[in-house]
Amino acid sequence: GQGSDKLAWFWRVNNRKQDQTDTWMDEFYRVNWLKAKARWNRWEEELSLVQHEMGWTVSWFKYQEEKWQL
């Protein structure tokens, strides 16, 4: 998993020629952004699933309650 939202200091150091580093860093940031977006999408999906599961659970207990009251 991703332990931190901040990049480590060594990823931000420019040791090469400026044009090479810019291209490499642009690609690095693009990949990092895509990973973060995928992580966000997974969490949104997980939230939706948990909310539906909780709704089903409450409905099941209500159904069981009605059975016991008969």
Image (cartoon, rainbow, N blue to C red):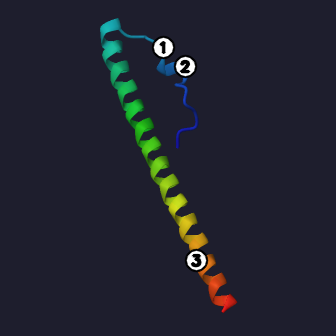
Q: Secondary structure at mark 1?
A: loop
In this view, which residue lies farthest toward the bottom?
70
Mark 3 or mark 1: name the one nearer the start of the chain: 1
- The percent position of residue 50, horizontal first and vertical second, equals 54, 59
In the image, what residue type sits under mark 1? Val
Residue at which label 2 appears: 9
Q: Closer to us: mark 3 or mark 2?
A: 3
Q: CA distance from mark 3 to mark 1?
A: 56 Å
| SS under mark 2 | helix
Dot 2 alpha-carbon crowd within 10 angstroms: few under 14, some 14 to 19, many 20 or more: few
The residue positioned 66% from the left and 82% from the top of the image is: 65
Which label number is shown at residue 55? none
Q: Which residue is mark 3?
A: 60
Q: Amino acid at mark 2?
A: Trp
Q: Residue at x 63, y 89 (%)?
A: 67
Q: Are marks 3 and 1 in contact (CB under 8 Å)?
A: no
| Residue lying farthest to the front in this orientation | 70
**Residue in view at x 35 percent, y 7 percent:** 18
Task: Please report contact status of discs 1 and 2: CB closer than 8 Å, yes or no.
Answer: yes
Q: Write down the residue under mark 1.
A: 13
Q: Residue shown at 43%/11% (left/top)?
A: 14
